[in-house]
Amino acid sequence: MIRLRRPSAEPLWREEFSVHGADERYVNRRQFAKFLVLTSLGMFAGNVWILAKSWLARPPAYPRRPVARLSEVPVGGVKLFRYPGPEDPCILVRRAPEEYAAFSQKCTHLSCAVYYARAADRLECPCHEGYFSARDGRVLQGPPQRPLPRVVLERRGDELIAVGLELRPEA
Ligand code: FES
């Protein structure tokens, strides 16, 4: 016996599956409020976690490491060294007999190595012409937004010892 299908405007699959898509997509006020409350609670918990983590975080401990003897760096000269780790290049600049400073050699823009331009008395990045002060590492020109991290030096007689790294977020 052949069964004939009743002509209908609905496709066959819709008759077979009694799922009402429009009803499923409908979100009532209670569900929406529940979603908002749960999302807000999740975000609040996340913020509390970040705050607690920042309160409990200790400043990093930097090693004490001899960098150079002052007598080995002439006035206007530099010495390259690594601090605090073996992958962290730094540059010591002696600008005057009693004036010296050391900075991370990684440009704060895209990490190219900066070098000391003695004539201009500044640290220059060759990649995009970012210039930094050789006195305090602040940005003088170019795309970098942050100053160079400064290596904190301690002098003991003729010897310069690195004791920390000063990260300064402000421009
Ligand atoms: S990487 Fe130094 S200015 Fe761009």
Image (tube, grey):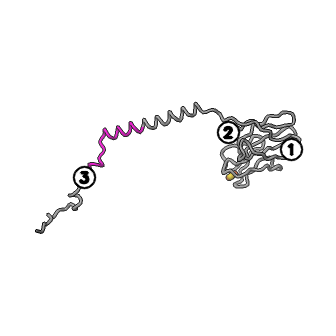
Q: Earlier in the sequence, mark 3 or mark 1?
A: 3
Picture quadrant of residue 30:
top left
Q: Which mark is residue 169?
A: none
Q: Nearer the viewer, residue 165 or 95?
A: 165
- Give the mark count: 3
Q: Residues within 10 Å of mark 3 (few under 14, many from 20)?
A: few
SS assignment for the magenta stretch, majority: helix
Determine the residue positioned at 65% across, 33% down. 59
Q: Are marks 2 and 3 in contact (CB under 8 Å)?
A: no
> Is 35 one of the magenta-colored residues?
yes
Q: CA distance from mark 3 to mark 1?
A: 81 Å
Chain-order first, disc 2 or disc 1:
1
User: Where is residue 16 drawn, in percent x and y?
Assistant: 21, 57
Hey, what amino acid is under mark 3? Val
Q: Which residue: 68% across, 39% down?
A: 167
Q: Residue furthest front?
A: 1
Secondary element at tag 2: loop
- In the visual, does 107 lie left or right of 92? left
What is the residue that sits farthest to the bottom in this orientation? 2
The disc placed on residue 168 is: 2
Q: Is residue 15 left or right of residue 155?
A: left
**Residue 36 image position (x, y, % from top left):** 38, 39
